[in-house]
Amino acid sequence: MYTRKNIRFTKAGALAVAVFALTGGVSRKAMAAPDASAGGPVDDAQIARRVLALNRAEQRTADAVKGKLASTAVWLLAERISLDDVALDQEFESLAAGDRAPDATGRPEQPDLSNLSGDDLENAYVDREVQSHQAMLATIDGELIPAARDGELQRRLGDLRSEVAAHLQAAENVKHAEWSRRTAQQQRADIGKTIGNDYP
């Protein structure tokens, strides 16, 4: 059994999910847009720096929430993303020639998780990971791999794609498991109310 808490929907949770959905849209735009400052196609070093920016944004988000998570399944998701992205950083650093700043090519603005806790945080974090990894896959397939010129960079982007797809699957599994558990819990509560009404 991976989860230790019941997840409930609240107005604050719904608002948080909406905020993260908007952030996902910003993320997709930021990842897909070429580097306007370059005035032309994205080169290999810019691709590598963009990957570093995205990986480090994911690491910061995961590390920020891990200490506040009570659900084991959600904590394991955050831990996996954090550790895997540290390893991916090492794969791309050597290819990010020139300015290696994490936000050298612009990175998506990250949502503030500091005011969320409990079920609201866990629901919003899992939804964010599903959306952000879907956006990352679309960008890798549609922008980064086609633009890469160096064979080694193409190989590493292929590895990155596999890792992102695995993270997406893990996030979707956690989301589905939580939905199934909440549905079963609601059904038990409804049955209990029905029995209570029939037998006062």
Image (tube, rainbow, N blue to C red):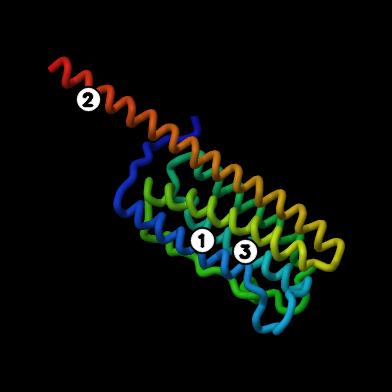
Is 22 situated left or right of 198 in this image?
right
Q: Which image quadrant is residue 15 in?
A: bottom left
| Mark 3 lies on residue | 54
Task: State the residue at coordinates (32%, 25%).
Answer: 188
Is residue 35 visible to the viewer in this orientation of the structure? yes
Tell me which numbered mark, 3 or 2, is placed earlier along the sequence: 3
Q: Are marks 2 and 1 in contact (CB under 8 Å)?
A: no
Q: Residue furthest right?
A: 151
- Earlier in the chain: of badge 2 and badge 1, it is 1
**Labels 1 and 3: the sequence-earlier one:** 1
Residue 74: percent from left, percent from top? 50, 44
Residue 90, how many percent across, how many down?
A: 74, 60
- Pick the front one: 86 or 15: 15
Find residue 113 and report its horizontal and vertical position in percent. Answer: 43, 59
Give the answer, above or below, for where 137 lies relative to 101: above
Image position of 173 with respect to 195: above or below: below
What number is the disc on residue 24? 1
Estimate the spatial distance between the alpha carbons at disc 1 and disc 3, rounded to whole Å.
12 Å
**Looking at the image, which residue is at 16% across and 21% down?**
197
Residue highlighted by disc 2? 193
Of residues 177 and 77, which is closer to you in this image? 177
Q: In the rendered image of this protein, does residue 119 appear above or below residue 181?
A: below
**How dense is the environment of label 2, judged by Cα within 10 Å: few (below 14), some, or many (20 and up)?**
few
The secondary element bearing badge 3 is classed as helix
Residue drawn at (67%, 66%) of the image? 52
Under mark 3, the amino acid is Leu
Give the residue type at disc 1.
Gly
The quadrant of the rendering that contains the C terminus is: top left
